[in-house]
Amino acid sequence: MQPILLAFLLGLSQGLLHAVGPDHCAAVATLGTLNGGRRRAAISTAFRFALGHATMLGGIAAVCLLAGFGLSETFERWAEIFGGAVLVALAVAALLFPNTMNHGHPHLPGHAQEPHEHVHTVSTAAGALMAISGVRSLLLALPPLLVGGSMSLAAWTYLPGFALGILIGMGAVGLLFAEGITRLNDRITLWVQRTVAVSSAALGLFWIGSRLVES
């Protein structure tokens, strides 16, 4: 197998594993509850989160490769604390401001009469912010591909593979969550939303606490 294809497939598999991490699943599920249980909006939110995550992760990693420097464990620890704080913030928003991710308004004459729904850019921003903590781990996976230097084509094909894996993995999580929640009645959906939010907050606080203990 060609090194370039091998690097791409390796990146794809690692991206899929990265996408289904507990913090990412919690964030995607929490953001999905802010769409009022609408399947299409929940899936769109998951892909927006994945796009922001993959773009930030790949962008910082590319800059580090070009500049030839790495990131310290201290940076990674504080970035993970920051990621935990973002997760807690999403959970608080889901608990206190449900359905804030969309708003409806009547269309002007000549347009469809259904409310027009918008998915706000907070999902993309949340994905990007939570990506910062994963940059160091991504960079540590690249050295075996850098035998030919930082401009090695194999290293650069690993990154789009990793990004595609994130998009597929997080998109699948969003799809599964959306399919599940749309089959529930309003009362059960409300309890699911609260449970997801509380669980996400607990995970974020645990993430923060465990990293502070290490410092």
Image (tube, helix red, strand yellow):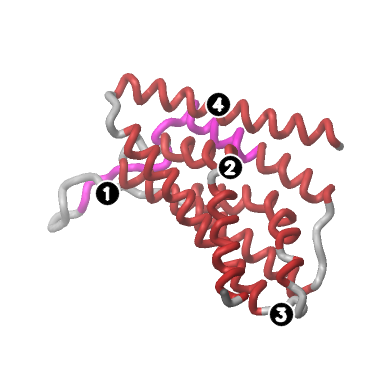
In terms of secondary structure, where does tag 4 sit?
A: helix
Residue neighbourhood size for the residue with mark 3, other residues' Cα within 10 Å, grouped as few (<14), some (14–19), many (≥20): few
In the picture of the structure, the residue carrying the numbered disc 3 is 151
Q: In the picture, residue 114 is in which quadrant?
A: top left
Q: Residue furthest left?
A: 110
User: 62 or 156: nearer the eye?
Assistant: 156
In the picture of the structure, the residue carrying the numbered disc 4 is 199
Residue interval drawn in magenta: 85-107
- Marks 3 and 1 sit apart, C-alpha to C-alpha, by 46 Å
Label count reads 4
**Is 49 within the magenta?**
no
Disc 1 marks which amino acid? His
In terms of secondary structure, where does tag 2 sit?
A: loop
The earlier-in-sequence mark between 2 and 3 is 2
In the picture of the structure, the residue carrying the numbered disc 1 is 116
Quarter holding the C terminus is: top right
**Contact, mark 3 vs mark 1 (Cβ under 8 Å):** no
The earlier-in-sequence mark between 4 and 3 is 3
